[in-house]
Amino acid sequence: MNGEEGNVAPRSSARPRYAALIVAAGRGHRSGLGLPKQYAQIGGMAVLRRTLLAFQEADEIDVIRCVIHPDDRALYDEAVAGLSGIGEPIAGGATRQISVRLGLEALSDEHPDIVLIHDAARAFVSRELITRMAAATDEENGAVPTLALSDSLKHVENDAVVGTIDRSTCRAVQTPQTFPFQAILDAHRAAAERDDLTDDAAVAEAAGLHVRSVEGDERNIKLTTSEDFARAAAHLAPAREYRAGQGFDVHAFCPGDHVFLCGVKIDHDMALEGHSDADVGLHALTDAIYGAIGEGDIGQHFPPSDPQWKGADSEIFLKDAVERVAARGGAIVNVDVTLICEAPKVGPHREAISERLSEMLGIARHRINVKATTSEKLGFTGRREGIAALAAVSVALPGDDNA
Ligand SMILES: Nc1ccn([C@@H]2O[C@H](COP(=O)(O)OP(=O)(O)OP(=O)(O)O)[C@@H](O)[C@H]2O)c(=O)n1
Ligand SMILES: C[C@](O)(CO)[C@H](O)COP(=O)(O)O
């Protein structure tokens, strides 16, 4: 119905102007991080920056302003560097309630119709939630995101439980809390003498404003303690899965004066027979890596029938396996190699072998273990007919193939 037909004043068809007020003037004492938590890095980005990006992506938001502590200007500038469309920061006060009021006063110049008041510390606010909250608010109704409680609720006095609260009528409340701008500014002005109102819905309630309850988002946590930060960081870390692989190889002795064991030349009264340099340790290790990533074995990639591998340095084979791990975005976590022979004695060369493996694998020395054993003069190794090697490897790969 329009004014001509119904004698009712026509409503403006212009869409409301939305402002986001991000309160970031707290000290974050409970986080114990040593700097105000909104400037701490999480997943390689400052908390405040992550929060602002969510509001920047929301189409309905026309104005974004932050309330900050005056001491934090340098931290703020660093956190918002390169972000466009963020207005000048507003100086906050000693409590959240004061910071919000000061922010609203400063926002008056922007003439918003609706304001979304949000904790900088809720960095996982989604664009969907912002849209939901904006849509639930009009000139008569504010709105808050709420979550049903899954724990029972008790009244506690001096460590004693004195009563049970009916949780069916209770909700946990998040931000952004959204209000008609002038009404919430007036409500904050009216409550300026109070210091017990922990959220803006409480300020609105005190002024008799109607506030709607809208479904919140479990992910929209307020980063408060160091445990919150640890959980959030783990959540942001790329998923990893761990794979194990094993390898085994044997080479027979032949006439000669040295052997290669894991890339180290060791003088001996025999050599090892093979198509390549017969480095039994590297062959077992290479197979273990192929095994961990499900890429067959060394013979498939470097067939002994192929003349180009005659006398080849076995580092080539190991490098191929290592590169295949890297190509999948993976990393070798640790390797464990066992060399089985009566001679040569491996002990004196163990350190050099570990160093060489560290170099070839590109992993720290402490991730490498080299063991040696005899077979108590039993079997072919005991009869000094050759050397056997075992290897075990663990590899971290991105994602989870089973997901
Ligand atoms: N004087 C204050 C206090 C809080 N906040 C902001 O209000 C949000 C919610 O507050 P809270 O999580 O309690 O943050 P802090 O007050 O910083 O935390 P703490 O109580 O651990 O010091 C935060 O984004 C915080 O920066 C604010 O702008 N001004
Ligand atoms: C605004 C708020 O995040 C809603 O849950 C909460 O009330 C802030 O409380 P705090 O005392 O500042 O942590």
Image (cartoon, rainbow, N blue to C red):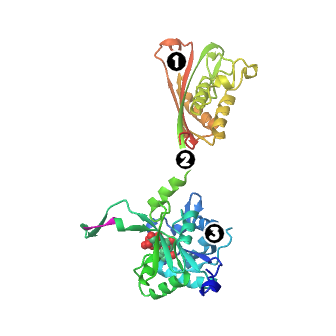
Asked where in the image residue 42 lies, by quadrant, the reply is bottom right
Q: Residue furthest front?
A: 5
Callout 3 environment at 10 Å: few (<14), some (14 to 19), or many (20+)?
A: some
Q: Are marks 1 and 2 in contact (CB under 8 Å)?
A: no
Answer above or below: position of 202 versus 259. Answer: below
Is label 1 in a helix, a strand or a loop?
A: loop
Question: Earlier along the polypeptide chain: callout 3 or callout 1?
Answer: 3
Label annotation for residue 266: none
Q: Nearer the viewer, residue 203 or 245?
A: 203
Q: Are there few (<14), some (14-19), or many (20+) residues within 10 Å of tag 1?
A: many
Q: Is residue 23 visible?
A: no
Task: First in sequence, mark 3 or 2: give its number.
Answer: 3
Front residue of 226 and 194: 194
Q: Which mark is residue 342?
A: 1
| Residue type at numbered disc 1 | Glu
- Residue on which the image places disc 3: 80
- Please report the residue visible at 24 percent of the width from the left and 67 percent of the height from the top: 160
Looking at this view, is 356 or 172 the one in front? 172
Which residue was labeled with disc 2? 239
Q: What segment is highlighted magenta in the picture? A: 163-167
Residue closest to the eye, 307 or 268: 307
Residue 295 lies within the magenta run: no
Left or right for 360, reference 339: right
Indicate the quadrant where residue 20 lies: bottom right
Q: Position of residue 270 (x, y in %)?
A: 62, 15
Query: As shown in the figure, which amino acid type bears the numbered disc 2?
Result: Ala
Q: Position of residue 121 (x, y in %)?
A: 51, 67
